Amino acid sequence: MPQLIFDGNIDNEHSLFNYFKTPTEDNGSSRVPVNNLEPQHQLQFYQDTLKQLTNELLQVEDELSNIRYILAASSDPILITDPDAKIIYVNPAWEKLTGYFIDEVIGNNPKILQSGKTPRVVFKKMWQALSKNLPFSTEEVIDKRKDGTEYQIYSAYFPVTKNGRTLYYVQIQHDITERKKLEDLKGQFLSMAAHELKTPITTLKLLSQAHLAKYKKFGADQISNEELELMNKELNRLVRLIDDVLDDARIENGKLNLKLEVIDLNELTKNVVTKMSQIATNHKIIFSGSPKLPAIADEQRIEQVLINLITNAIRYSKPNSRIEVSLKQVKNQIRIAVKDYGVGISPDKFTSIFERFYQVNNHSNTGFGLGLYISKEIIDAHKGKIWVESEINTGSIFYFSIPLLKA
Ligand code: ADP
């Protein structure tokens, strides 16, 4: 019997499909048309051919389903269209990214995803490349999900062709929304950092020049305490900003090393409140604790979190308003709360305020949007939790908890 070989190429002259056009059977050195054979041999030939064809088809089907498995296993979204740009396949990663199910999009044009924010020139360049059977890639596509939210993707498009004819267009995507967001934030951060650092430096420079002139003319007596305090305040602000940037770099490099020891959190919090009350004379900071709440913690880092939260409470509330710092045991945790009666935060910002560089409004004269991010990293490193409850124009309570050291 002849060997039927299906090599996947439907134009190959030895292919299964061509074989049916002019069925022949090898007979020694020559190939004999099947029609010339005895009827029982003809029947046998067709039975064998059919069997072989079935096997071949099963194998092709197997290979196709393997390809489907490979596409489905990809963690990057994949979309395939026919030559008329109608969607014929999307993988589960694509469904997850866009919120659409495969059945909802089959037959549609990928235009359904357009947000209107992708520069038109991108699509123009894409079609120019694809029409010449060339691949094209871009980081400029901003699409929208089924729920209307937007995402930015790296997209690689390539045509699948056969004998010069386009069969499919394949688009492999990679979600770069977070990376782009961070890049934007970093850009904003750099210009903000330059501005924020320049302000205290300029003030310090002017003050020190004025003091020097006064000192030379009238001696040290003429320099008032207020003037020196102002310099001290600006210097502290500068140091705090630089510390935040350094801590941010430590976190990035995984080097926020804790110096763990047994500390009494009640004592530490009380001391921080006393210290802050002396500085922030425009606010009433009230402490209520519970004796002996030991924890294994880094004293300086927990103090830093407390200072961050109390400083924010001062910053975002009116002078003379109360700030309540309390501490209690809740199950096997020590829970600390810093409550203010200030501007408050809307619930949709409760998560983002703990993100790197995030600021609700660009308040001037504050920080870099790093304080809560660093605080969260510190508390996470203590296997604790930090969160907020707040209402706009009523005030906020920032909580954090860390494990209590059992006696
Ligand atoms: P920043 O140094 O800019 O204050 P943070 O990370 O400390 O950065 O805070 C992030 C944002 O969270 C702030 O820009 C502010 O809008 C908001 N926020 C923090 N604490 C409070 C608070 N107690 N009351 C109201 N808003 C707050």
Image (tube, helix red, strand yellow):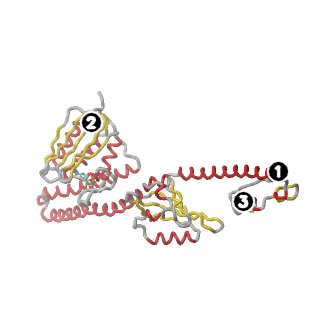
Residue ID for mark 3: 17
Left or right: 40 as drawn, with respect to 16: right
Pick whichever, 3 or 161, lies toward us.
3
Real-space CA distance between mark 1 and mark 2, rounded to the nearest whole angstrom: 91 Å
Whether label 2 lies within 8 Å of ligand 1 gets the answer no
Real-space CA distance between mark 1 and mark 3, rounded to the nearest whole angstrom: 23 Å
Say what secondary structure mark 2 lies in: strand
Q: Is residue 192 above or below residue 73?
A: below
State the residue at coordinates (25%, 43%): 399
Left or right: 146 as drawn, with respect to 289: right
Which numbered disc flags the more N-terminal residue, 1 or 2?
Answer: 1
Q: Within the image, what quadrant is residue 224 found in?
A: bottom left
Real-space CA distance between mark 2 and mark 3, rounded to the nearest whole angstrom: 76 Å
Q: Is residue 164 visible?
A: yes
- Where's residue 404, x and y in %? 29, 33
Q: Given the image, on which type of amino acid does mark 2 rest?
A: Ile
Residue ID for mark 1: 40
Q: Within the image, what quadrant is residue 230 found in?
A: bottom left
Please tell me whether mark 2 or mark 3 is closer to you in this view. Answer: 3
State the residue at coordinates (34%, 50%): 247
Q: Given the image, on which type of amino acid does mark 1 rest?
A: Gln
Residue ID for mark 2: 334
Pick whichever, 266 or 224, lies toward us.
266
- Where's residue 383, x and y in %? 35, 39
Say what secondary structure mark 1 lies in: helix
State the residue at coordinates (85%, 53%): 38
Pick whichever, 201 or 343, lies toward us.
343
Say what secondary structure mark 3 lies in: helix
- Where's residue 177, x and y in %? 41, 58
Q: Given the image, on which type of amino acid does mark 3 rest?
A: Phe
